[in-house]
Amino acid sequence: MSGIIKYSNIVDVLPKLPEVLLNTIQSDVLEIKSIDKECKKCLDTCFTIPELKDAYYVVFSKYIDKDNHKYEKFIFLGKDGEELFNVSGLEMELYGLITCTTLDYTDAYKAFLSHSKK
């Protein structure tokens, strides 16, 4: 996916996103998802990780399989993309906590996805 920018509106939606995260998300090295603030898992996890109540997004690697999940780090972001805190895969799982984002794919990324499915 070399040279293809993934999201067209990420800078507008997340103006405080650190540049290193922006670049790794845009190049599809890391993934960003929204946190489902109303799901039971989120509400329950807020008791053990209170900072989660202020988080709106999480950045993670989509390439780490479940067997190696304990070695992963999750980067939680605030509403404007500011980095709030990190949690290791030993402390929690994202399953059931995340949902799609409101970020829009670029036309080039959509074309890449349609060609890669063939």
Image: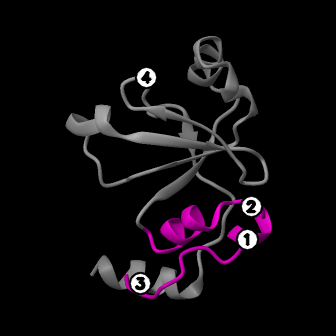
Q: Looking at the image, which residue is at 44% across and 69% down?
A: 28
For label 3, the residue is: 112
Q: Position of residue 7 (x, y in %)?
A: 61, 73
User: Split into 4 quadrants, where in the image is the C terminus?
Assistant: bottom left
Residue 16 on the magenta span: yes
Name which residue type carries label 2.
Leu
Name which residue type carries label 4.
Glu
Tags 4 and 1 in contact by the CB under 8 Å rule?
A: no
In the depicted structure, whether residue 39 falls above or below residue 107: above
Q: CA distance from mark 3 to mark 2?
A: 24 Å
Tags 1 and 2 in contact by the CB under 8 Å rule?
A: yes
What's the magenta region?
A: 1-28
Secondary structure state at the residue bearing disc 3: helix
For label 1, the residue is: 11
Name which residue type carries label 3.
Phe
Q: CA distance from mark 4 to mark 3?
A: 35 Å
